[in-house]
């Protein structure tokens, strides 16, 4: 399919990387069709031909609310990325291990995007969570589903509470991606 850029995460998508997180996309990308960004999971309508169209913000012009949204979103995505890493370590079935590992990759990329757009320089340190209460693959999947539902409602509110057009568009893209994750963890 040649080379395109993802407007959301800014990565260049090409024949070498289109399938790296195929286990964490609703349908895997194929050589002929890239349906999703393999790095952040954005839908293909967020692809562009030129790197100049990658979304950026002028952090000086963002509202307090928008800066707060990026701060919370960064923490939420790292929190979920850490959760998926743990889920991947403890899952029994190989297919779940793989899906969780790749979902972690995607959530960590989301955190990076929020840091860039919100002008956050330092990766937040989160408290370590004990997931001992989760006993098997099914329980991790159920927990994942709850988290994805929470993420969708967070982004939904974020869209309503932001004014900047780019911010709204980016949050919308993330809301769609997390909706895909709900379906994948059902
Ligand atoms: Zn992307």
Image (cartoon, helix red, strand yellow):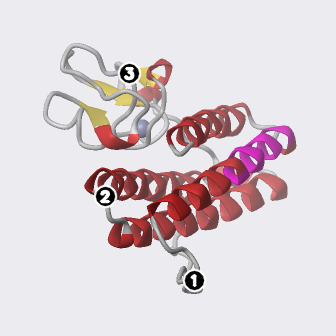
Badge 2 or badge 3: first in the primary sequence: 3
Q: Quadrant of ligand 1?
A: top left
Asked whether, in this view, residue 22 is left or right of residue 155, the answer is left
Q: Which mark is residue 93?
A: 2
Q: Nearer the viewer, residue 55 or 30?
A: 30
Mark 2 Cα shell of 10 Å, populated few (<14), some (14-19), many (≥20): few
Quarter containing the C terminus? top right
Numbered label attached to residue 147? none
Tell whether 82 sits left or right of 175.
left
Secondary structure at badge 1 equals loop
Disc 3 residue crowd, few under 14, some 14–19, many 20+, Cα 10 Å:
some
Question: Which of marks 1 and 2 precedes in the sequence?
Answer: 2
Compared across the picture, whether 156 is left or right of 8 comes to right
Badge 3 marks a residue whose secondary structure is loop
Instruction: Based on the picture, tell me whether residue 155 belongs to the magenta stretch.
Output: yes
Asked if the residue under mark 1 is in contact with the one under mark 2, i.e. CB atoms within 8 Å, the reply is: no
Q: Which mark is in front, 2 or 1?
A: 2
Give me the residue at 50% from left, 69% from top: 83
- Judging depth in this view, the residue of 127 and 100 nearest the camera is 100
Q: Which residue is mark 3?
A: 35
Comparing marks 2 and 3, which lies closer to the viewer?
Answer: 2
**Mark in the foreground, 3 or 1:** 1
Cα distance between the residues tagged 2 and 3: 27 Å
**131 and 170: which one is in front?**
131
Q: Which residues are magenta?
A: 150-160
Q: Which residue is mark 1?
A: 129
The response on whether ligand 1 sits within 8 Å of label 3 is: no
Measure the alpha-carbon separation of dots 2 and 1: 23 Å
Question: Residue 79's spot in the image, x, y percent?
Answer: 57, 69
Residue 44, x across and y down, in percent: 44, 21
* Element under disc 2: loop
């Amino acid at each position: 399919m040649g080379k395109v850029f993802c407007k959301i995460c800014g990565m260049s998508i090409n024949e070498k990387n289109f399938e790296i997180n195929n286990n964490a996309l609703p349908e895997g990308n194929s050589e002929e069709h890239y349906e999703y960004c393999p790095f952040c999971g954005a839908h293909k309508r967020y692809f562009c031909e030129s790197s100049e169209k990658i979304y950026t913000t002028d952090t000086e012009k963002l509202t307090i609310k928008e800066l707060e949204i990026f701060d919370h979103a960064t923490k939420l995505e790292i929190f979920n990325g850490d959760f998926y890493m743990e889920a991947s370590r403890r899952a029994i079935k190989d297919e779940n291990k793989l899906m969780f590992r790749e979902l972690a990759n995607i959530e960590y990329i989301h955190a990076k995007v929020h840091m860039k757009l919100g002008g956050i320089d330092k990766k937040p340190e989160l408290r370590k969570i004990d997931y001992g209460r989760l006993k098997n693959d099914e329980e991790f999947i159920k927990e994942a589903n709850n988290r994805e539902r929470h993420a969708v409602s967070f982004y939904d509110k974020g869209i309503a509470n932001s004014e900047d057009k780019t911010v709204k568009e980016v949050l919308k893209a993330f809301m769609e991606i997390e909706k895909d994750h709900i379906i994948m963890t059902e």
